Image (cartoon, rainbow, N blue to C red):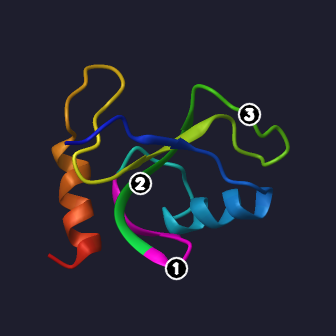
Amino acid sequence: TGAFHADCEPLTAKDAEIIKEVWGGNYSWAERAVIVEVDGRKIAASMASMPHDVEYIKDNNFSGHFDLHFRNSTRHKDGAVSQAHQKQIMIAAGV
């Protein structure tokens, strides 16, 4: 079963600039298929780039965090699985 999604922040201002560029020049709630690589392992995921809420990294030109969903991840607000994110995860997985 899934759990809450990951709340993430770009480490640097350059990272934030790349995110914005990938979303066509503007941050957005639009879900996109992404691949997350951790220690050589590639994981299908879905990301929305809109900065919101809690922020820990202050010098990255990104006011808040973005959402990163994995298979069966749930939303904080209602514990539901986002079907829009799940669709993007399947695209990222090549299914």
Bounds of the magenta segment:
31-41
Q: Could you say where residue 9 lies in the image, as x and y percent from the top left?
A: 64, 46
Q: CA distance from mark 1 to mark 3?
A: 26 Å
Q: Is residue 56 left or right of residue 7?
A: right
CB under 8 Å between callouts 1 and 3? no
Residue 35 forms part of the magenta stretch: yes
Q: Nearer the viewer, mark 1 or mark 2?
A: 1
Residue 8 forms part of the magenta stretch: no
Q: Of the two numbered discs 3 and 2 on the same chain, state the one appearing first in sequence.
A: 2
Q: Could you say where residue 24 lies in the image, as x and y percent from the top left?
A: 50, 65
Depicted 36 relative to depicted 84: above or below:
below
Quadrant location of the C terminus?
A: bottom left
Q: Which residue is mark 1?
A: 40
Which residue is at a point 68% across and 56% down the rendered structure image? 16
Which residue is at a point 53% across and 49% down the rendered structure image? 27
Q: CA distance from mark 1 to mark 2?
A: 20 Å
Q: Which residue is mark 2?
A: 47
Q: CA distance from mark 3 to mark 2?
A: 19 Å
Quadrant of the rendered structure where residue 8 is? top right
Q: Of the two numbered discs 1 and 2 on the same chain, state the one appearing first in sequence.
A: 1
Q: Amino acid at mark 3?
A: Tyr
